[in-house]
């Protein structure tokens, strides 16, 4: 194992191992402070980025299975909103996605087997909503809640996509031969 004076030649030479341990502790604390500052800067930049343009609700952490299952998510007030669900059975079960606070178009992307299926509810009252369901049984038995102020489309691709008790509200329904995204 390298001694601190070998790693950091500008440090004074110490005689005992206990002196070296205190230097390693000092270096570890300095690294932790630096990491904390970097994390705070990242959070600050994300807050600034979220204050303008499209808002994203991300349920696709590396497209893991069951991501956002039975979750309640709401688009923040403001511009447009993008809800991203990817991975087997993500955004499924009793998940609710409320897009009614968005002031711009809302895009809901469900990619993977059984994504956005079950009792999943998309609340699109009074907004332009585009729902894309790509995968076997994607959006199966899901419900889109709309009203006269709602507009948009539901695009479905895959075996049993948008099937069962799927309710599209007053949105246009398109079945396509390949996933549009």
Image: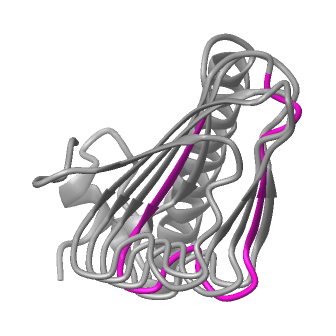
Tell me if residue 128 comes above or below residue 66 in the rendering: above
Q: Position of residue 57 (x, y in %)?
A: 63, 48
Q: Which quarter of the rendering shows the C terminus? A: top left
Of residues 27 and 145, the one drawn nearer to the viewer in this rendering: 145
Asked whether 96 falls inside the magenta stretch, the response is yes
Asked whether 178 falls inside the magenta stretch, the response is no
**Mark count:** 0
What residue is drawn where x is 57% and y is 72%?
Answer: 22
Q: Residue furthest top?
A: 52
Colouring rule applied to residues:
one colour
Q: Position of residue 45 (x, y in %)?
A: 62, 23
Of residues 28 and 18, the one drawn nearer to the viewer in this rendering: 28
What residue is drawn where x is 49% and y is 71%?
Answer: 139
In the rendered structure, which segment of residues is drawn in magenta?
A: 82-102
Tell me if residue 162 comes above or below residue 7 in the rendering: below
What residue is drawn where x is 45% and y is 78%?
Answer: 163
Q: Position of residue 23 (x, y in %)?
A: 51, 64
What residue is drawn where x is 51% and y is 87%?
Answer: 66
Q: Residue furthest left?
A: 177
Q: Which quarter of the rendering shows the N terminus? A: bottom left
Magenta region, main secondary structure: loop
Of residues 23 and 129, the one drawn nearer to the viewer in this rendering: 129
Task: Write down the quadrant of residue 165 in the picture.
Answer: bottom right
Q: Position of residue 85 (x, y in %)?
A: 47, 62
Q: Is residue 76 left or right of residue 60?
A: right
Task: Write down the quadrant of residue 59 in the picture.
Answer: bottom right
């Amino acid at each position: 194992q390298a001694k601190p004076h070998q790693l950091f030649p500008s440090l004074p030479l110490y005689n005992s191992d206990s002196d070296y341990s205190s230097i390693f502790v000092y270096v570890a604390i300095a690294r932790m402070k630096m990491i904390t500052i970097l994390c705070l800067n990242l959070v600050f930049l994300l807050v600034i980025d979220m204050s303008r343009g499209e808002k994203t609700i991300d349920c696709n952490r590396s497209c893991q299975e069951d991501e956002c299952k039975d979750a309640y998510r709401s688009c923040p007030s403001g511009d447009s909103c993008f809800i991203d669900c990817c991975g087997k059975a993500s955004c499924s079960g009793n998940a609710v996605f409320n897009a009614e606070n968005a002031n711009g178009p809302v895009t809901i992307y469900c990619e993977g087997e059984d994504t956005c299926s079950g009792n999943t509810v998309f609340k699109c009252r009074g907004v332009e909503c585009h729902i894309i369901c790509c995968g076997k049984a994607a959006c199966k038995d899901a419900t889109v809640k709309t009203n006269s102020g709602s507009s948009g489309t539901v695009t479905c691709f895959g075996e049993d996509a948008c099937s069962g008790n799927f309710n599209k509200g007053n949105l246009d329904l398109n079945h396509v031969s390949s996933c549009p995204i």
